[in-house]
Amino acid sequence: MSAPVVIETQTLEVSIGPQHPSTHGVFRMDVVLDGEVVVKLKPVMGYLHRNHEQLAEKMPWIASMPYTDRLDYFCSMSNNWAYALAVEKLAGIQVPERAEYIRVIMAELTRLQNHAAAVGFLLSDCGAWFTPVLYAFRERERILDFFEAVSGSRMMCNYCRFGGVRVDLTEQTLAMARGIVERFPRFLDEFEKLMTENEVLMARTQRVGILPKALAIDASISGPMARASGVEYDIRKVDGYGVYPRFEFQVPVGETGDVYDRYMIRILEMRQAVKILQQALRDIPAGPFQNPAVKLRNFKIPAGDGYGRIESPKGELGFYLVADAAGKNPYRYHVRPPSFINLTILEDMCLGHKVADVVVILGSVDIVLGEVDR
Amino acid sequence: MSAFGKGLLDGLRVTAVNFFGSYFDKGRKERLFTYQYPEERAPIPENSRTFPFLVADDPNDPVGTIRCTACKICEVECPPKCIYIVMDRDEKGKPRQRPKVFDIDLSVCMQCGICVEVCPFESIKMDNDYEKARYGRFNELVEHLPDLLKPNAYYHRIKPTEAAAVDAKLKAEAEKKAAKAAAAAAAKPPPKPAV
């Protein structure tokens, strides 16, 4: 009986990115491969660092609002809301009811278009070359047109103000939003028929990149990624900020926490977002859309600190703000970006998988580098 | 569990429906959503904003009837600091309440529209012209006062509702001011006798 043959192999270090279509921006992964299997993965961030936090500390409170659009450029409306919420909490500002409803409508539409684009790109990473993305973008286009009609810009909306929003929704724009919400379920049905039960997709994504529930909690993963791993945690339910407690919706939760669950969770969340939108558009009250007591210029905040967070489409987006005695600009301004924290777990999900799966797993995290690097 | 390959075929049916549907008038608008720019242009919503411009009331004398008073509020409030203003002064150094230099660096401007919101004189507004390509990156992208000045009629053309509201507001303010001045003139005490 002879001893089993052991072949000496060498590991190979490959650098994926920073200019690689699968990395969704300027993000680099140092991957150490044994054959095709990943044995080590180091995410390298910081290529898109723009000094957002330090810039904000040198500027008046309102001047950071347009910069928050550029954090996660897919969901500028949610970013605006998170920042406005943090400042309102810190300064004790009341928000009129209509403004709260408008914010919910905007945030949920943002969730629709972000998730549509995210699953589209995920499928594109799997090899469904651009058909799903274009179907998703066709729908996203209508939402962006709505954003432009209301706020003036498709992506850099700069829409929320402390104590309200900048522009009211008119009858025409409300009708536009109703039209989008009405046709969105049809798009979802078509989209699901296109890919959800596809055998190739299942083979590529099921049991790939599993994130166990305990690890997800330990690594403070939030958003659809945590929920796909079975963590029932949604800040809309936990905090109940804005007028969310008034709406009836469910929080979809996954089981295995693999890539397919993350795909499915996003589809289900879009269905729930449509449900919230229907209720919000039905119940939106008349009234002022901006608290008249809040001035735009010479806005000051009493000394103190506060943390405001919302359930952005990618997870928990929080702003930690400290105001000093002068109160003219933030003394400390810190962003808790969801996709940055979600990205820290990338190595644990990728170990033991093939290098082609790394691309798919990264796509399922749904990162935007503007937010990761700030 | 359905038969193996059913999901794949279902997906292919969706793409086929979309592909052939785009040849029929009924599905065309739904499915072909790309605008063939520059032959075809997307309609611009009224709220749409790109870069700021300055409003002048009289198109024949834009510099004389500029609404801007060079108060420099927008220069201070602009988040990326892309505005540069120098006030016009006469020979004695007395301010003329209008800008001598008003530059906006388009390469720095991020189109947030905060200058419009803080302006107390309704003088700076957001344009919706998006064709601003230039042959250089530095001085070519700095717009000076003559480039920025646009007549009020242009503002009415691109944003009718907003411009009408602004005009009504300015008119009301002017009337209020005139009434106040008339009241002040009527209630003016007789001039003091010379000592």
Image (spheres, grey):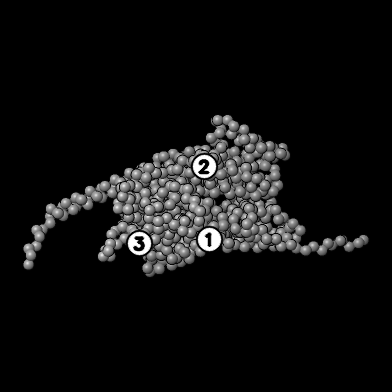
Helix, strand or loop status at disc 2 = loop
Q: Say left or right for B68 vs A214.
A: left
Q: Residue at x 68, y 60 (%)?
A: A15
* Residue type indicated by callout 2: Pro
Comparing B74 with A311, the one in front is B74
Q: Is residue B133 above or below residue A31?
A: above
Residue drawn at x 41%, y 44% is: B46
Cα separation, mark 1 vs mark 2, equals 35 Å
Give the percent coordinates (x, y) of residue A267: 58, 45
Q: Residue at x 41, y 57 (%)?
A: B104
Q: Return the mark for residue B38.
A: 2
Tell which of A272 and A193 is nearer to you: A193
What is the spatial separation of the Cα atoms under label 2 and label 3, in whole angstroms?
A: 38 Å
Residue A286 visible, this angle: no
Q: Do the residues under discs 1 and 2 have CB atoms within 8 angstroms?
A: no
Residue, disc 1: A374
Q: Is residue A270 left or right of residue B147?
A: right
Q: Is residue A304 above or below residue A366?
A: below
Q: Look at discs 3 and 1 and give the one toward the viewer.
A: 3
- Identify the residue at horizontal 74%, vertical 62% (top origin): A12
Tag 3 residue: B86
Q: Chain of mark 3?
A: B
Crowding near the residue tagged with mark 3, few <14, some 14–19, many ≥20 C-alpha atoms within 10 Å: some
